[in-house]
Amino acid sequence: MRKPIIAGNWKMNKTPAQAAELVKELIPGVKDALCDVVVCVPATDFAAVKEAAQGSNIHLGAQNVHFAQSGAYTGELSPEMLKACGVEYVIIGHSERRQYFGETDRTVNLRVKAAVEAGLIPILCVGEMKEERERGYTDALVEYQTLIALNGLTDAQIQNLVIAYEPVWAIGTGLVATDEQANETIGVIRKAIGHKYGQAVAEAVRIQYGGSMNPGNVKGLMAQPEIDGGLIGGASLKAPDFTAVVMYHK
Ligand code: 13P
């Protein structure tokens, strides 16, 4: 059985003081969660979140990582730097990075490999745009994005990482994929991994849904057999909402 994992993606929100306050508000509500709980925060909040989350079941995540160890890459952070700050998880290939910052499937693959080699757990994001779904390209696209991103990794490394299926049209729009749509596309991703890496790897890898997930729709999504958790944007910024999503089983 795969342990569910629910992660907040705070995106470009929260100062260190606000971050510490949010984490402190979350701790009592999520302490009995049956899933892994992660908050992926801006790098400027790492220290504040690490300190506030001490002794709790809330794990620290980042929102991007560079693939080089060090060097002339202004504005970037290496895997080792994240590790040194206590980061355990890192979102890679989020659609906002693909859309606004020139992220490609090739750089996503480099980042995933570098993260895994440093002992970070990637949360690899894949997903189609609205017109790609309308034209019937969803399955081919998510398969392609997934397999390129995982290229060069061992079976053991793949089993241990997390994938987030985020249809771009559902992010921040209030439009949510139906439970069945999300389940079906996540099944397509899992099947593609099974074809290339074998059934055992496919059965072990955790695949989240992301895109306007909130306290109102989490139960239906989490009841689907292929959906192993959520990557939560807007609803992760308010303690009551994120707590309700994490405690979806209550
Ligand atoms: P929303 O939950 O705000 O739609 O964002 C989803 C997302 O992009 C998480 O990475």
Image: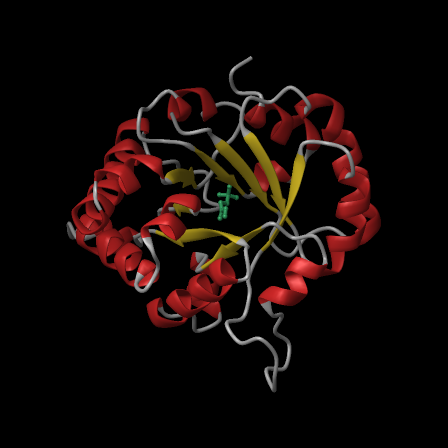
**Residue 244 image point, x, y percent:** 60, 23
- Residue 66 vertical position relative to residue 173 in the rendered view, above or below: below
Give the quarter of the figure containing the N terminus: top left
Seen from the viewer's position, the closer of residues 120 and 245 is 120
Residue at point 73%, 54% (across, down): 46
Residue at point 15%, 49% (across, down): 136
Give the quarter of the figure containing the C terminus: top right
- Side of 150 relative to 102 (left or right): left
Seen from the viewer's position, the closer of residues 211 and 80 is 80
- Side of 148 relative to 214 (left or right): left
**Residue 202 image point, x, y percent:** 28, 40
**Residue 200 image point, x, y percent:** 27, 37
- Side of 62 relative to 106 (left or right): right
- Residue 190 vertical position relative to residue 146 in the rendered view, above or below: above
Residue 168 shows up from this direction: no
Quarter-of-image position of residue 77: bottom right
Residue at point 46%, 25% (across, down): 218
- Side of 96 relative to 185 (left or right): right
Q: How many marks?
A: 0
Quarter-of-image position of residue 95: bottom left
**Residue 105 image point, x, y percent:** 34, 67
Seen from the viewer's position, the closer of residues 173 and 213 is 213
